[in-house]
Amino acid sequence: MEFKLVISNPKSGLSAQQSVKDEAARSLIGLKIGDKVGGEIIGLGGFEFILTGGSDYCGFPMRKDVQGIGRKRILAVAGTGLHKLERGIRQRKTVSGNTVHERTAQLNLKVLKEGRDNLFEAAEKKVSEKKAAKEAKASALNL
């Protein structure tokens, strides 16, 4: 069993991806959207996260207001899994429940408390490289 984790940091706006397998993945089963997750469970001591969502193996998004683990067809007005075309339009959409289960593929986590390690080092490096390239391009155009 394996889950892909997308970890976002609201302070810096950066995100990092990580993968958890076997025992760490089993410890996440049964959690619901909005539950707090200790970093020790997934090998990131000192961190604390909140589960904000995810998707199942077919890409159907987890939705907080749909109880359980299976997929359900809901009549949605707004929210996760819906792109509003016009005001007042309701659409029938298939979404996954709010509980993590074996067929969940991806989990979205938000950092509540940071630990000692820098999870977002690669993202920071990528941002600084893009910024440097943009500045070099702008200076080349000004010459």
Image (cartoon, grey):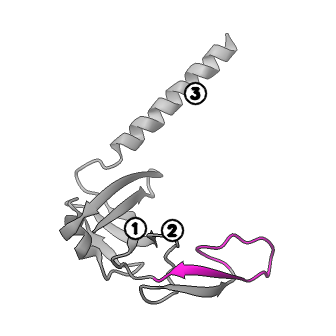
Q: Quadrant of the C terminus?
A: top right
Q: Residues within 10 Å of mark 3 (few under 14, many from 20)?
A: few
Label 3, label 2: how far apart the Cα atoms are: 34 Å
Residue 33 occupies which quadrant of the picture?
A: bottom left
Q: Is residue 113 left or right of residue 127?
A: left
Q: Residue furthest bottom?
A: 67
The residue type indicated by label 3 comes to Lys
Residue 138 occupies which quadrant of the picture?
A: top right
**35 part of magenta stretch:** no
Label 1, label 2: how far apart the Cα atoms are: 8 Å
Classify mark 3: helix, strand or loop: helix
Magenta range is 78-97
Percent x, y of residue 2: 30, 65
Q: Residue furthest front?
A: 58
Specify which label sits upstream in the sequence, 3 or 1: 1
Specify which label sits upstream in the sequence, 1 or 2: 2
3 or 1: mark nearer the eye: 1
Q: Which residue is mark 3?
A: 134
Residue drawn at x 32%, y 75% is: 36
Do residues under tags 1 and 2 come within 8 Å of each other at their CB atoms? yes
Give the main secondary structure of the magenta stretch.
loop
Q: Which residue is mark 1?
A: 105
Q: Is residue 32 left or right of residue 26?
A: right
